[in-house]
Image (tube, helix red, strand yellow):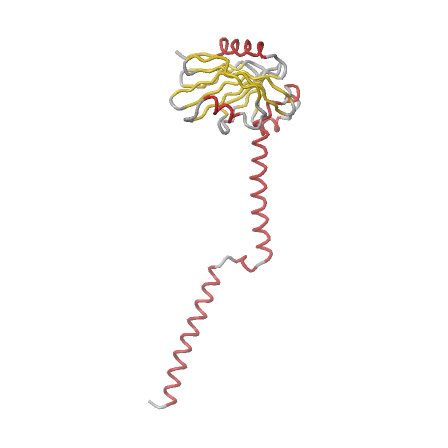
Amino acid sequence: MDERSTWRTVLSVLSVIILGGRLLYTCSNMNKPRYENDPVMESFRNSQETMKENFRQQREIQKKLSNTILYTNYESLDSLSALQKDNYGIQKLEKDSLIYIALDTQIKIPKDFYLQNRHDDSLRMAFKSPDNLNVFIHDFESKAEIESSFKNLKNGANLQKFKVENTIGDVKAISYKITKKSKRYNGYALCFKNDGFLSFYEFESNKLPLDKLKGRAIEFFSQNMKEKK
């Protein structure tokens, strides 16, 4: 084979390699997102990510506000718009309503109470009476003891004067004080532990003294707890 033939062979091989390289480069660029080198598309993508993060943060803020909305005065709740009430997950009941809290147990929420029934976190439901009595029902699975679990539940509310008033079997009655929205609340809770689940029925008021709050709690249970037969 002469020198000219050898160079022809080499050039042919190089041509194939260069052509193949160009083809691979073109294909790889086709597989890349079109906006990778497009400043307009990149800006749009960044704005979309920012909007998603802002929406997530707004939902977290709304969730925190929803969890404390019933510490607002009853009259102030009345002044909220229908959209605001919907965002907070509250509704004013137009009639007495029975709601299941167990397979065989219902609780009656009287007419004109504000009901919050969002099932957020450990909060099963909450309601507020026209005279500003708040009732919260929390339940969750836990191996911890009632006292420590209740203290964790009220963490961040400046829990004070925590006291186990009475114990009957696995049921404990607890009195306490908390601060919410710069207001002091007396609290009285009945706490149950059953098969690894903890349930807390908390009655709180910034108007009633503790002894009257206990009476309201006992009265509410006797009048509004309904066992399905």
> Which quarter of the rendering shows the C terminus?
top left
Left or right, 20 with reference to 137: left
Residue 27 to residue 105: above or below: below
- In terms of depth relative to the viewer, which is nearer, 223 or 193? 193
x then y, percent, for residue 168: 43, 12
Residue 122 to residue 16: above or below: above
x then y, percent, for residue 205: 60, 16
Quarter of image, res 214: top right
Q: Residue at x 57, y 31 (%)?
A: 64
Residue 39 to residue 176: above or below: below
Q: Residue at x 56, y 43 (%)?
A: 53
Quarter of image, res 132: top right
Q: Residue at x 48, y 61 (%)?
A: 30
x then y, percent, for residue 194: 40, 20
> Which quarter of the rendering shows the N terminus?
bottom left
- In terms of depth relative to the viewer, which is nearer, 168 or 203? 168
Left or right, 107 with reference to 111: left
Q: Residue at x 59, y 37 (%)?
A: 58
x then y, percent, for residue 118: 51, 26
Q: Residue furthest bottom?
A: 2
Q: Count every numbered label the image shows and give the total.
A: 0
